[in-house]
Image: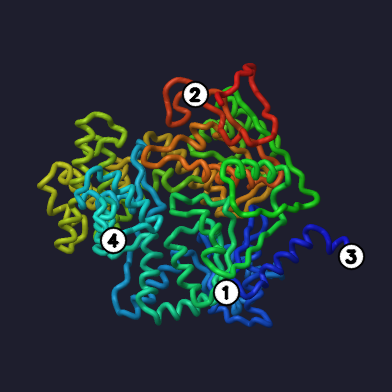
């Protein structure tokens, strides 16, 4: 029996139980990939509600990073097969929410007390719509920020809008500043008020403002968060830190957070690993713990992944020496292909050799990198699931148009419809890639005209579409866009075929019938699967970022060329090498058995956004930290630059 008790698994279970029962806090637990952080949170909840603590469930708040994580937490607590975390419904916390959902609840509570109307509209920042040419890509939030910059009459409105977006995401707003981005942000807030709307940033910021204004409200929510559990603490941003600090201020002893700074990959949302690194400085008396047993990855995978992240994104935090499952052994392979076409053939052959006994994740930095592989899998009759972002689906464009037609008084939906209609016609809104001075001027004039419709909408307190109708005679752009929106509303009153035909003609979301057919087929397959659990023999193709939280027997990573990943960035947004290294670390540590890393020595024209002639890309710099000896394929031994 002593041998069983001293096994790494038993030691890990006892360690988790010990950490879960640490009280008083605050407690920060570093939880690397595959170490069981969700299970630890479940153990913490059970420790609190059962004897001798007997904490009331309505004094526990659990904050998750995503809706899926929230559902997973509830499922774990309700699973009778997981006796160490199972709780009857009556003992489960009612407040298991994402940060934004919790902020929305606080806002509603504050407005209920003040007897004022609630915002009825959420401005989407994580859902995009594109034109058939895939050259325009925007979200409701981005579009309104751009309009706000034009209304603020600042120079370089599109650049100012991007700066304002970054400030809002990072919680760096300065309401009384006369900086161009602050002026644009002020106009943006006025648009939100006029539309009775909030965005994701404002959900958290407005919640904090409400708590700070109303001591009674703050006390109420501090009682509900007397024991505050926070998942994925490495991905919070400044407004979210502010909310956590406010809720836990009266009861620091109940604060319990888990995360891993090496897995912080959401800087585009303002997330920063600095918050988890500064936990002890932010919360005095903090108790710092680590989970040290890896239930997922073999040591071979963890060693290579850790070397990459340590070299390119060194952490100041001391990491534990991991223990592993006794029977878990893995392999790490690096493959250099002479071309991207040969690479696709090699990956297809590798996948065929692993099926049907293994489930497989194929990860790419961008969807287009997987195009050749998908063709190869199709020719080999290998079924795969290629989970797309909403923005990749042309059907989302039709959905955006239908959303407005079904509710024409929704100003934000109307503005989105106007943008899609304008962007579908280069004569109205030339591509953002145009270089002709005349076309650039035409584009700016069109964007300014569509933005200024808000001035009339706000001044007259009418929806955007009605303001557009009022101003249509003043501008050819507005006249054309309004006429086509009118055509859509008329078709909506007719037969479905007429409405569908009008949408496809006015704002076509696909280049060709083949594109449309392929997308509808993929969607039908995805719906037929019903989101079922993954079992052996499944091939999933997705981006690096989409893979966070997943795992597979075998992981194949493509796109490891420096110009693709980490890439060169843009003038207004340089590439973050450290975060890119962390993103690769996350991708590598999805592997339970086998990890295969691919790069090519030559790329075809149009294989990526670069176009032109075949070129020899530099090997991804992160591969320099991988010890596995590369296998060179093809008759040529020529190596990629770098």
- Mark sitting earlier along the chain (1/3): 3
The residue at which mark 3 appears reads as 1
Mark 4 lies on a secondary structure that is loop
Number of the front mark, 4 or 2: 4
The residue at which mark 1 appears reads as 254
Rendered view: 109 above or below 518: below
Residue at point 65%, 65% (across, down):
40
The image shows residue 328 at horizontal and vertical percentages of: 77, 48
Q: Quadrant of the C terminus?
A: top right
- Mark sitting earlier along the chain (1/2): 1
The image shows residue 170 at horizontal and vertical percentages of: 40, 55
Give me the C-alpha separation between circle 4 and circle 1.
Answer: 33 Å
The residue at which mark 2 appears reads as 604
Looking at this view, is 308 or 532 the one in front? 308
Give me the C-alpha separation between circle 1 and circle 2.
Answer: 57 Å
Number of the front mark, 2 or 3: 3
- Mark sitting earlier along the chain (2/3): 3
């Amino acid at each position: 029996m002593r041998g069983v008790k001293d096994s790494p698994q038993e030691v890990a279970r006892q360690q988790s139980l010990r950490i879960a029962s640490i009280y008083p806090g605050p407690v920060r637990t570093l939880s690397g990939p595959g170490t069981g952080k969700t299970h630890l949170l479940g153990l913490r909840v059970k420790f609190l509600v059962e004897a001798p603590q007997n904490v009331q469930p309505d004094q526990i708040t659990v904050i998750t990073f995503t809706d899926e994580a929230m559902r997973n937490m509830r499922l774990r607590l309700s699973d009778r097969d997981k006796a160490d975390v199972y709780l009857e419904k009556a003992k489960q916390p009612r407040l298991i929410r994402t940060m934004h959902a919790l902020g929305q609840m606080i806002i509603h509570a504050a407005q209920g007390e003040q007897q004022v109307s609630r915002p009825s509209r959420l401005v989407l920042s994580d859902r995009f719509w594109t034109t058939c040419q895939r050259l325009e890509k925007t979200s409701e939030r981005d579009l309104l920020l751009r309009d706000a910059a034009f209304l603020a009459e600042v120079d370089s409105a599109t650049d100012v809008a991007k700066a304002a977006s970054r400030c809002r995401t990072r919680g760096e707003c300065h309401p009384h500043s006369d900086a161009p981005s602050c002026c644009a942000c002020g106009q943006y807030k006025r648009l939100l008020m006029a539309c009775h709307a909030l965005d994701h940033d404002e959900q958290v910021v407005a919640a904090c403002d409400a708590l700070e204004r109303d001591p009674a409200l703050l006390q109420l929510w501090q009682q509900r968060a007397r024991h505050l559990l926070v998942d994925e603490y490495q991905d919070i941003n400044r407004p979210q830190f502010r909310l956590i600090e406010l809720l836990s201020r009266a009861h620091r002893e109940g604060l319990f957070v888990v995360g891993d700074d090496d897995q912080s990959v959401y800087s585009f949302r303002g997330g920063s690993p600095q918050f988890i690194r500064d936990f002890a400085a932010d919360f005095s008396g903090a108790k710092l713990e680590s989970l040290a047993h890896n239930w997922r990855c073999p040591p071979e995978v963890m060693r290579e992944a850790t070397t990459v992240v340590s070299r390119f994104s060194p952490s100041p935090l001391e990491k534990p020496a991991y223990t592993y499952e006794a029977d878990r052994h893995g392999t790490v392979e690096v493959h250099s292909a002479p071309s991207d076409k040969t690479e696709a053939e090699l990956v297809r052959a590798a996948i065929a050799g692993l099926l049907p006994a293994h489930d497989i994740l194929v990860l790419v930095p961008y969807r287009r990198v997987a195009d050749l592989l998908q063709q190869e899998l199709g020719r080999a009759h290998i079924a795969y699931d290629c989970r797309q972002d909403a923005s990749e689906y042309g059907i989302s464009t039709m959905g955006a148009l239908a959303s407005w037609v079904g509710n024409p008084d929704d100003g934000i939906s109307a503005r989105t419809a106007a943008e899609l209609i304008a962007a579908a016609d280069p004569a109205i809104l030339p591509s953002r890639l145009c270089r002709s001075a005349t076309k650039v001027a035409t584009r700016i004039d069109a964007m300014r005209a569509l933005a200024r419709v808000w001035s009339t909408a706000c001044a007259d307190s009418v929806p955007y579409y009605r303001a557009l109708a009022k101003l249509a005679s003043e501008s050819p752009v507005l006249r054309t866009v309004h006429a086509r929106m009118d055509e859509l509303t008329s078709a909506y009153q007719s037969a479905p075929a007429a409405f569908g035909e009008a949408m496809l003609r006015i704002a076509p979301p696909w280049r060709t019938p083949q594109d449309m057919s392929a997308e509808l087929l993929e969607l039908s397959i995805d719906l037929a699967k019903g989101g079922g659990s993954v079992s052996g023999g499944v091939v999933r193709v997705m981006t690096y970022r989409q893979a966070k939280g997943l795992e597979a027997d075998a992981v194949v990573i493509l796109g490891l060329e420096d110009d693709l990943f980490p890439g060169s960035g843009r003038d207004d947004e340089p590439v973050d090498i450290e975060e890119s290294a962390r993103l690769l670390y996350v991708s590598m540590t999805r592997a339970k058995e086998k990890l295969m890393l691919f790069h090519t020595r030559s790329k075809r024209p149009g294989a990526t956004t670069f176009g032109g002639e075949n070129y020899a890309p530099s090997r991804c710099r992160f591969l320099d930290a991988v010890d596995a000896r590369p296998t060179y394929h093809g008759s040529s031994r020529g190596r990629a630059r770098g």
